[in-house]
Amino acid sequence: MFIQCDTIASAKRELVQAIKEEGYKQHIDKGSFEKEKTYRTQIPTVFVDIMEPQEKFDKPVEISDMGIKRYVAAMVDPDCPENAEYTYGERIAIQIEDAIAMMSYAKNTNQAIIEVGSPEDIKLKNPPCLRLIHFMFFEDKLNMTVFFRSNDIENAFLMNMYGLAEIQNMVAMISGIECGKISYICSGAHVYTFGG
């Protein structure tokens, strides 16, 4: 399924509607909420082009700018608390400077990619949902493609995407490039139903 929309908030609305209309029910054997009376309705693979990800005029009020700043700070913080199996920050932080450097001196490359996932993740109880962040210079803009193995559209999508848009903006500003679109790919975009 392919969706093109203007903003992150409009992408969420379109995704929720698509899942309601075309998704399938899946009881959860392994993953979030396993062993509870919960199922998810999901679309197996979706591609969404968000043409103006930096535009926030329709950002829901429950997503505060301070909340986004805290989320982004955690996404680039290399420290992992002792009680955590991993953090996005510890995986992104060690690669973000190289991605910025690459986009600053060699814009025309396919190699500015941050791998959030690792081979050991298959053994984790809750492996990272975000797996890849790919920066590409195209049509004189810094475009970004992100891949999620799974994404809770109602509860996580907005913060994930506003946070990633801030990372795109940071890389673009430091590299001296204007921000372009974000292409979102997810192989398990879903909404949960509790007590089902």
Image: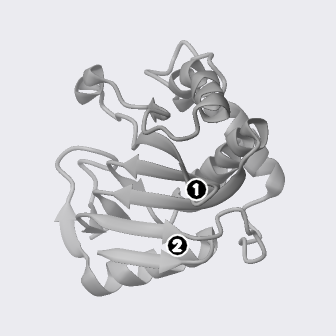
Q: Position of residue 115 (x, y in %)?
A: 42, 31
* Residue at left offset 27%, top offset 60%: 37
* Residue at left offset 51%, top offset 17%: 83
Q: Position of residue 8 (x, y in %)?
A: 60, 68
**Quadrant containing the C terminus in the rendered view:** bottom left
Q: Residues within 10 Å of mark 1 (few under 14, many from 20)?
A: many
Above or below residue 1? Residue 108 is: above
User: Which residue is the extreme one toward the right?
Assistant: 66
Q: Position of residue 32 (x, y in %)?
A: 34, 47
Q: Which residue is mark 1?
A: 161
Q: Any mark on residue 12, and which?
A: 2
Q: Residues within 10 Å of mark 2 (few under 14, many from 20)?
A: some
The type of residue carrying mark 1 is Met
Q: Is residue 194 visible?
A: no
How many marks the image carries: the answer is: 2
* Residue at left offset 35%, top offset 34%: 127
The type of residue carrying mark 2 is Lys
Q: Earlier in the sequence, mark 1 or mark 2?
A: 2
Residue 30 falls left or right of residue 125: left
**Quadrant containing the N terminus in the rendered view:** bottom left
Quadrant of residue 92 within the rendered picture: top right
Residue 179 falls left or right of residue 183: right
Q: Element at badge 2?
A: helix
Q: Identify which residue, 5 or 111, lies in the foreground.
A: 111
Q: Identify which residue, 98 or 131, lies in the foreground.
A: 98
Above or below residue 19? Residue 55 is: above
Residue 66 falls left or right of residue 106: right
Q: Any mark on residue 27, and which?
A: none
* Residue at left offset 72%, top offset 34%: 73
Q: Is residue 39 visible?
A: yes
